[in-house]
Image: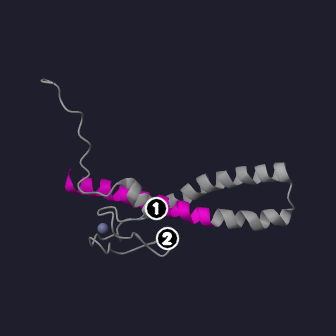
Amino acid sequence: MPGTTSPAAPPDLGGAAPLPTAALLGRCPRCGRGALFRGLLAVRERCAACGLDLRAHDAGDGPAVAAIFVVGALAMIAAFVVEFRYEPPLWLHAVLWPAVVLPLSVLTMRIAKAALIALQWRHRRRSAEGV
Ligand SMILES: [Zn+2]
């Protein structure tokens, strides 16, 4: 139809990997192909696929805060539900909840750390380049 404009174009991400890909799969924030982590939570110095220097990016305490708020709240709710519904012995709580909370905490911290590093890379790069 003449006179109509196309919908607003999506923001230019400048070749950045999609945030869900970078966060959920733990990939490089620029190319989305290279692994971000070396081990469980340690960030690699450099992307093996594109060579992006990852040493300058630091997520700080953000991933731990995400794990505390998300996993801690869910674990407390689940512990109360199990206690009031099934009334298991105390030793079962002592065995069950660390086995649930520790892997979920590591998973949550990996996702949060990758997301924070991806967001840092996008925003710091743009401000440094004046884009
Ligand atoms: Zn890369």
Q: Are marks 1 and 2 in contact (CB under 8 Å)?
A: yes
Q: Residue lying furthest front in this view?
A: 1
Q: Quadrant of residue 90?
A: bottom right
Residue 36 coordinates in the image, percent (x, y)? 39, 69
Residue 1 coordinates in the image, percent (x, y)? 15, 24
68 in relation to 57, above or below: above
Q: Is residue 112 magenta?
A: yes
Question: Distance of mark 1 from mark 2, alpha carbons?
Answer: 8 Å
Label 2 Cα crowd, 10 Å radius (few <14 / some 14-19 / many 20+): some
Q: Quadrant of residue 71?
A: bottom right
Three-letter residue code for mark 1 = Lys
Q: Secondary structure at mark 1?
A: helix
> Mark 1 = which residue?
113
**Quadrant of the rendered image holding ligand 1:** bottom left
Residue 101 coordinates in the image, percent (x, y)? 66, 62
Q: Which one is nearer the viewer's eye here, 33 or 131?
A: 33
Q: Secondary structure at mark 2?
A: loop
> Mark 2 = which residue?
41
Residue 7 in view? yes
Magenta highlight range: 103-131
Three-letter residue code for mark 2 = Leu
